[in-house]
Amino acid sequence: MSESPKAVFISYASKDVVAALRIAVALRAAGVEVWFDQNELGGGDAWDRKIRAQIGSCALFVPVISAETQARHEGYFRLEWHLAEQRSLLIAKGRPFIVPVSVDATTERGALVPEAFLAVQWTRLPGGETGEAFCARVKKLLGLDSETAAPRPRPAQPAGSGASPRVGRALRARQAWGIGAVVAVVLVGIFGWSRWREKSDAVTTAQDAARRSAQPTSEAAAVNDKSIAVLPFANLSDDKENTAFFSDGMHEDILTTLANIPELRVISRTSVMEYRGTTKKIPQIARELGVAYILEGSVRRAGNQIRLTGQLIRAAKDEHLWAKSYDRELTTKDMFGIQAALATEIAGALHAAISPAAKKLVERRPTENLAAYDLFLNARTPVGGTRNLANRVKLLEQAVNLDPDFAEAWGVLATAHARFINTDLDHTPERLAQADAAIARAVRLAPDTPEVMLAFGSYARLAYRDLPRAAAQYEKVIQLQPNNSGAYLNLGFVRRRQGRWAEGLSNIRKAAELDQGFATGALVAMLACGRRWDEAIAMRRQINLSTDERSLLRDRLPRLVFQATGSTKEAAEILAQLTSAERDSPPGIREQKYWATVKGDFAEWKRLDGVPSNADPGEPDWSEAVDAAMVLAAHGDLTGARTRLGNHPTQLRSTLELQPANARSWGGLALMEALLGEHEVARRDARKAVELVPESRDAWDGPPHRFNLAKVYAWTGDKAQAVAELARLLRIPVAIASSNQDSPLSVHTLRVDPEFAPLRGDPQFEALLKDPKNHAPLF
């Protein structure tokens, strides 16, 4: 690290690494020297001496303040803060040194920071998003604003990664790529570093607990004092197997009811479900979810009776505010009455006002038919896969047959039909007509309820790609429920389909901030598709660290690291940890086959290909056959490839006679025809898919069809056209569906993808992969 007299030292708590990294990258891109302690991983006395020396010689000290620092009374970052404050006493009055940055809602009032931090104005950088104004201010404080010299020398970087002059947004993005070598150390070591720092901070956990019990605890200023997480209800019914859907349904409905109170920030069901059966303490859960209160409870259903118990806990003090028990008859009036009473009780405890409009939503009863409500709850059971979607439609149709005035059920039914259409599982006119009829009924019955508005937005987005109408519905929901993370997430999905990438990212980030844990996967995917590799990897590692029990086979980090760096080290470590049962399971076989393909280990791939493994859930039946045929063809076995396709081409042609607007089927058929030697037909059918979903209409779903067209060009001998398509696609964000993951288009995946085997060795293709701008951030 250079010993520049004008360097900035960034100090942060371990869990704020993503926000701190954004600040560091932005300042470096603006030509500021940044000392970011993850650049030198290690620990120990030598490392400690170096950190102390840097704090003693840096020009500016930037402490990152957040809910995490508020919750942590002990930690290495506090030593850094103390050292900075001590140095500030030696600096002449009026000379800037400490520049505090708050990366969430934390304010000066009640902040657990040194006095010196309160003597200067704080800067708000939500999530670490750092704009030009902050960078300009830092440069001015450093006296760099008048400098015209070239940027300071940096550590040696790989050939081709040198920084270029920063003129405009596009060139700033290229500069960010240029400092990628500096950040690369962060990416490679971030997991180990987080573990080390957590271990270092944990040394004083017992002292911290003792201190909490000995003196008053100030609730973190950054945590919204009207925020709550409702943990999954324990099912105390005797017939647990047949009543699990009921306790889960009650849990979800209480969350929905609470969300109707605008002042409350309610964590989604998606985020809290991982805490079912957890042994974590309430304060820890609250810190991870970023809430001030926790509600936990149970549901017991027996005959025509229901008992719901709940206890509200102020998390910072682990203090039980009240416990309630509701015994009612199993009628819709009493069940929805429990939900309304509980929501009202919570709002009162959190001092959240309930307006007349909100009161009406809280107290409404969506149906008067108990059997219809049971079917509706069952339909919402979160089980993935195509068959579940079909079963969901069946249950919802039964529910609305029992109660034709059940508006919410009609809305969910409309979105289920729309998902069939959007995923090209069923793109028939009949399916579209069913979606139309369901949403029309929902809107006619309850046009002003948030649930129906959300359903209407999703229907418009998924069934018709009517993005303006979808956005309008989500914005209405945000007006009614300003803390509805789902509405922000869906609005982000709309904006990225419109090609409004920065706006989409902002909305998805807002969803993740409102609901820590929820929407983070979508945020990682968005960052990765924008080739903001450092942030995406750091966030994915942070998600992994905060998850107690996660399936190794669902860990998306190895693929992300490979897409970003070309390294398979993470994958090798994960595969080595698999148990025999995991290795032999269908997902395990699929994962091993994927990495065998990446490594070019054809013998291993063939061995695994002979092991039965069910098709990937959610993928069409023909998808696995095409993937395998491409691998075989890439290794010269064209006869085996054609045999592997079996009867799928004929079946797809039959499908397309009934579903001529099914773009994915046209694309799959085109790949089969290319392998079968029907070149002109293959190119025609691939172009048909592109015409059905043009980029001008959908900037998210459109590019994958052009990517498929590039594959067809490659296999039909039109290499120049294939390279031209790829060159254009590498200039925009592209998400490629792969094993139920949104995978970004990356030069590293293109290099090993068997679907582009015909291009290997082609000078234009190889030049494309080596061009630094094709791996640089896009927005």
Image (spheres, rainbow, N blue to C red):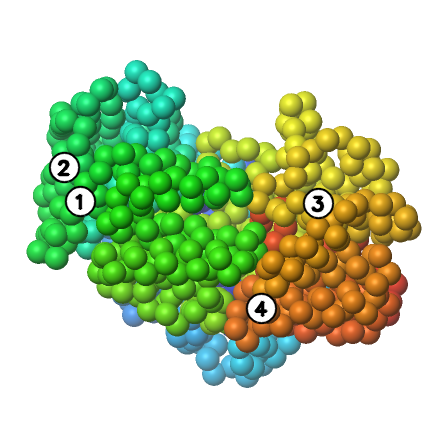
Please tell me whether mark 3 sits on a helix, a strand or a loop.
Answer: helix
Residue 732, compared with residue 73, is above or below; it is: below
Label 2 is placed on what type of residue? Answer: Lys
Who is closer to the viewer here, 168 or 577? 577
Q: Relative to the observer, which residue lies in front, 212 or 327?
A: 327
Sequence-earlier tag: 3 or 1? 1
> Hey, what amino acid is under mark 4?
Val
Look at mark 2 in the image and give the residue it sits on: 333
Q: Position of residue 179 (x, y in %)?
A: 61, 64
- Marks 2 and 1 close (CB-CB < 8 Å): yes
Nearest to N terminus: mark 2 or mark 3: 2
Quadrant containing the N terminus in the rendered view: bottom right
Residue 344 falls left or right of residue 407: left
Q: CA distance from mark 2 to mark 1?
A: 7 Å
The correct choice, above or below, for 166 with respect to 250 in the image is below
Kindly check if marks 4 and 2 are in contact, taking CB atoms under 8 A apart as contact. no
Q: Which residue is mark 1?
A: 365
